[in-house]
Image (tube, rainbow, N blue to C red):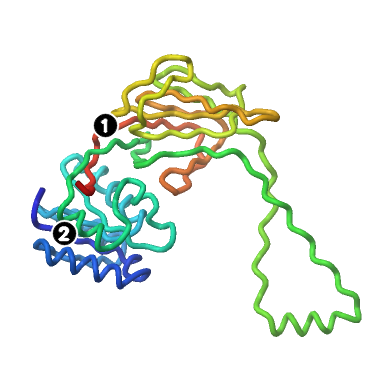
Amino acid sequence: MSDQLLVIIDPAARQTDGESVRIAKDVLSAGAAAKVCLPDGPEEFARALGRRGSRRPVVIGDDHALLRAVTLLHRERELGGCGLSVVPVGGAGDTSLTESLGVPGGAVAAARAVLEGTERRLDLLVDDSDGVVLTGLVIPPARRVPAPVPEPVAPAAGRWYRTLLARTLPARPPRLPSVPSPGPTRLRVQLDGETLVDLDEPLESLTVTPGAPGAPGALGAPGAPGAGTAEVEFRPLSVGAEATPLRACGRTVTVTGPDFRYRADGTVSGPVRRRTWRVAEAAWGLVLPS
């Protein structure tokens, strides 16, 4: 790996935790020749990453900053030849994805891993709209949002008191609208061209994870090796006792059905009626502690 670093500090990280940003920048600058970039927005972020030359890119920021960098490199078809490093800095829960990949949580430990770590090649999912998924996706079950409780009507004698409160208290937050439950999720799930679940088999949930270890297939077949495959886990709708999840491994997953949304790497996408994900084996590199 190159000893020269291009340190791109995401603007959200500077606003959220400037002290951690300063510590990480100092550790990196003390251990390597580092050029520091302070982009003001996504366009400048992309421009800085595109002009990295032979420098090794280091992103200081949260999960969204890492996803932005991976997506940009993937769309420029430069992801395979560029090992990324990241120092997670963000609010509570904003760096959980990055840390789940094995990156240390503290600014000092993460910066030292950038300097002393080893690049590890990881699988990811690429969908038919050229989007990428690093850690997995889930199509959750339908949920019912409780209907709002109507405001009690005050008697006439108490209306002056309510008027006084309305003038002195902060505004009440808006109530969530009532959203009727559309019922169980009905999807057709195909793995490498074979149908695992059809529209007449309602599901509680469906998850797809890249690079999963081999597991017994849902149809009784032995599991495929972890590298270059995705694990599909689906839970049929059950009345009474909770249904046992079923699992299968393959390289291409296609989901079809009525408009559905899915959560990938913490971001909700959709609605769509059809989406295909394929596994890209060892498609990107992330520097992790040796």
Marked residue nearer the N-terminal end (1 or 2): 2
Query: Can you tell which quarter of the image residue 169 is in?
Result: bottom right
The picture places residue 213, in percent across and down from the top left corner, at 35, 29
**Left or right: where does residue 164 sit relative to residue 121?**
right
The mark total stands at 2
**Left or right: where does residue 4 sit relative to residue 69?**
left
The picture places residue 268, in percent across and down from the top left corner, at 48, 47
Q: Which residue is mark 1?
A: 281
Residue type of the residue flagged with mark 2: Leu
> Looking at the image, which is closer to me, 149 or 221?
221
**Left or right: where does residue 173 sit relative to residue 12?**
right
> Looking at the image, which is closer to me, 271 or 29?
29
Identify the secondary structure beneath mark 2: strand
Q: Residue at x 38, y 32 (%)?
A: 277
Residue type of the residue flagged with mark 1: Glu
Query: Can you tell which quarter of the image residue 74 is in?
Result: top left
Q: Residue at x 37, y 35 (%)?
A: 127
Q: Residue at x 40, y 35 (%)?
A: 209
Identify the secondary structure beneath mark 1: strand
> Looking at the image, which is closer to me, 87 or 9?
87
- Residue 86: assigned label: none
Query: Can you tell which quarter of the image residue 187 is in?
Result: top right
The picture places residue 165, in percent across and down from the top left corner, at 75, 82
Contact, mark 1 vs mark 2 (Cβ under 8 Å): no
Q: Which residue is mark 2?
A: 6
Q: Residue at x 82, y 83 (%)?
A: 161
Q: Specify few, some or many for label 1: CA neighbours under 10 Å numbering under 14, 14-19, or 20 or more.
A: some
- Distance Cα–Cα, label 1 vs label 2: 26 Å
